[in-house]
Image (tube, grey):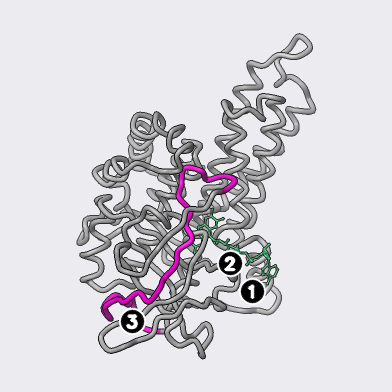
Amino acid sequence: MESIYFNEEHHLFRESLRDFLKKEVVPHIEKWEKTGTIERFIWEKFGEMGFFGIAYPEKYGGMDLDLFYTVILLEELQKVNSGGFAAAIWAHAYLAMTHLNKEGSHEIKERYLTPSITGEKIGCLCITEPFGGSDVAGMRTTAVKKGDKYVINGSKTFITNGVYSDYLVIAAKTSPELGNKGISIFVLDRDMPGISATKLDKLGWRASDTGEIAFDNVEIPLENLMGEENMGFPYIMQHFALERLIMGINAHARSEFAIEYTLQYMSEREAFGRTIDKFQALRHTMADLATEVEICKTFNYTVAYRLNQKEYVVKEATMSKLQSTKVADNVIYQCLQMLGGYGYIEEYPLARLLRDSRLGPIGGGTSEILREIIAKMIIDGKDYKPAT
Ligand SMILES: Cc1cc2nc3c(=O)[nH]c(=O)nc-3n(C[C@H](O)[C@H](O)[C@H](O)COP(=O)(O)OP(=O)(O)OC[C@H]3O[C@@H](n4cnc5c(N)ncnc54)[C@H](O)[C@@H]3O)c2cc1C
């Protein structure tokens, strides 16, 4: 099945990425999970290897490769078993950088996209606010034009890379009276006066920094507006298709990791004189789980293929995240059970996997919101069109 989507070069890329992660990342994961800080050197190494540039134009230092290279990057990152590390990387490479690439001017791309590809600058995407994340249009942060500046006031929360990143892509209301038609996107340097960030403690994704950020009369040049004024909402919605597919792919990949590890464990662990993978009750559970994951993966690859063909797959990407994250939570819960008491012990991978996986149905659109979107499309006949 994989060969429909992956050619020899994809396979070679996967192998070299896997070697790189094993050698350069895995030895540091425990430390980063404990400190909640991913050291700078690894960002630069990712940059040197070209991993941040696979989806971006050659003009700005990228490689402009098809979406299946991104699929491979996401899958292999999940297999390192640090949802936080993976999130820090993909939030930079696919949340912040997607906006820079699609809406940024040539100057913005030179100033932010190129150093993001080399790993010299790290970015974050700030949409969610303390007063509500699902209701994006209800955001309260404002950007008021004063002479040759915008002045930004407000706050954001739950922002991945929100504390240690170098720049922030943020959504703010330029015309609050217009509701969701009055939102714009800006890029801000971390060291601009008036920006402060606090790190949040959280259940999982522990290697990544999740920040609450305040903007107090932050003055930014007019040219830091990205794309057209008041077009922010459609830009955000447009990129949700990729973001949700990313979260679906992450979910099938971490499910696969859980199953692979658990089957190995079951083939070694003995009870009542035989290895536990001989008990029919457990075998059938694993058979069900493997089936569910395979179906998600096949669906996700199809959606990736269509997105790569430039189809606007809003409904399918929404379904991908909804179903794959639900399956992942169940798979990981059940796999943990297969390990008995060891499942609950930090030395074994399932404990962290369970914590990290729980964010799947919450971040980037909760499952309830995703069901609303799908219901509107299949029941009310709503059709979402891309902004550009
Ligand atoms: C670790 C972490 C990292 C994150 N990273 C980022 C990031 O990098 N950038 C960013 O912008 N955001 C980020 N988020 C925010 C995330 O996207 C939001 O938490 C999410 O969208 C939900 O918003 P909320 O937390 O405000 O929940 P709320 O919107 O307050 O929702 C609360 C509950 O009500 C339900 N609900 C709300 N509206 C409806 C409705 N209409 N119908 C039915 N149920 C409804 C929700 O499903 C949920 O169960 C991150 C969050 C976390 C925890």
**Residue bounds of the magenta highlight:** 202-229
Q: Is mark 1 within 8 Å of ligand 1?
A: no
For this rendering, which residue is in front, 94 or 185? 185
Q: Quadrant of the C terminus?
A: bottom left
- Residue at x 64%, y 18% (from the top left corner): 267
Is 121 above or below relative to 382? Answer: above
Q: First in sequence: mark 1 or mark 3?
A: 3
> In the image, residue 224 lies at what x, y percent?
29, 75
Q: Amino acid at mark 2?
A: Lys
Residues at discs 1 and 2 in contact (Cβ within 8 Å): yes
Residue drawn where x is 70% and y is 34% of the image: 287
- For disc 2, the marked residue is 315
Task: Please state the horizontal and vertical placement of residue 141, each as a whole percent of the image.
Answer: 47, 76
Q: Is residue 190 something one can see in this rendering?
A: yes
Which amino acid, mark 3?
Tyr
x, y (%) of residue 36? 45, 43
Name the residue that disc number 3 marks.
Answer: 150
Kindly state the secondary structure of the residue where label 2 is placed. Answer: helix
Q: Residue at x 22, y 60 (%)?
A: 60
Would you name the residue on which mark 1 appears?
A: 377
How far apart in space, not on screen, are marks 1 and 3 (Cα)?
37 Å
Q: Is residue 274 left or right of residue 228?
A: right
Query: Does residue 356 appear to the left or right of 13 in the view shown?
Result: right
Residue 173 coordinates in the image, percent (x, y): 45, 81
